[in-house]
Amino acid sequence: MGIYVSFYLFLLCSNIIKVYAYAHLLCFTALENADSDIGLCGWILVLFSILLTLLTLPLSIWMCIKIVKEYERAIIFRLGRILRGGAKGPGLFFILPCTDSFINVDMRTITFDIPPQEVLTKDSVTVSVDGVVYYRVQNATLAVANITNADAATRLLAQTTLRNVLGTKNLAEILSDREEIAHSMQSTLDDATDDWGIKVERVEIKDVKLPLQLQRAMAAEAEATREARAKVIAAEGEMNASRALKEASLVIAESPSALQLRYLQTLNTIAAEKNSTIIFPLPIDMMQSFVKH
């Protein structure tokens, strides 16, 4: 019985030692990260918070230990000031329950759709354009300290940038140079969001919607262009055919027997079609006497 009691006392003492070791570690970390500009009252509040944490052990230790995930970072504020060292995480970190607060920042890539924007192009055509933006938080401290809501600000800036960039382009450039427009938007957004700790990774133009009347006009223009091109091609074919016929007539004129061979070839072609029409070719010499009379 005495052995079991001694064993339990040993475990209790070891747990108490561990708790106080964690508490001393917490106090050391708090004093190490403390800002030297918090002033005398700030130091008094920090020391009072540490003392209160030590007095309420081991319950207070659960309020001091925080964990952030692999894709998150924690920005710790002590008496309204960001602690030295910037963002904490991923993993385990300690805070003081009375004087410290923290904000979690997601570091993963975020995707959002740009709502369709009615844009007046350089050649006075109204089009509706939408797109997609991919961005991530590059500096968690700047994303928290320099702007109220980085996500909302990036979305609004993307809409404004889309209208501004497309306003300097013609309709033909918008329809054909989407890749160039996307790169221009990405560069503009990245420069503007650099002070917010945000990195714009990619911008894509999804769809360009034209008014119905403009679609009909463009379709009619394309149809007329195709018809004109077809007429030009047909005229060029007729001209080439007439040149070939002229050259053939000159060859036949040089040898009258060539015309007779042409008749026989034509008769062979007609006979292969299995019809009942019979053609008897007559020599041209026999017809010349009738032509003279």
Image (cartoon, rainbow, N blue to C red):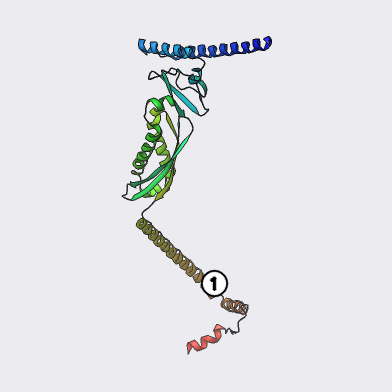
| Residue drawn at 56 percent across, 12 percent down | 16
- Check the image and report above or below for 74 versus 241: above
**Residue 173 in view here:** no
- Check the image and report above or below for 29 versus 147: above
Nearer to the camera, 109 or 16: 16
Residue at the far front: name it: 1
Q: Which residue is mark 1?
A: 251
Residue at the far left: name it: 124
Q: Quadrant of residue 34?
A: top left
In the rendered image, residue 267, in percent from the top left (x then y), is placed at 60, 79
**Residue 219 in view here:** yes
Q: Is residue 58 left or right of residue 208?
A: right
Q: Element type at marker 1? A: helix
- Check the image and report above or below for 284 versus 90: below
Nearer to the camera, 57 or 186: 57
Nearer to the camera, 138 or 85: 85
- Circle 1 crowding by C-alpha within 10 Å: few under 14, some 14–19, many from 20: few
| Residue drawn at 46 percent across, 68 percent down | 238
Quadrant of image for the N terminus: top right
How many numbered marks have been drawn onto this rendered protein structure?
1
In the rendered image, residue 144, in percent from the top left (x then y), is placed at 40, 26
In the rendered image, residue 69, in percent from the top left (x then y), is placed at 52, 27
Query: Which amino acid does the dot numbered 1 rest on?
Result: Val
In the rendered image, residue 88, in percent from the top left (x then y), is placed at 48, 22
Nearer to the camera, 3 or 145: 3
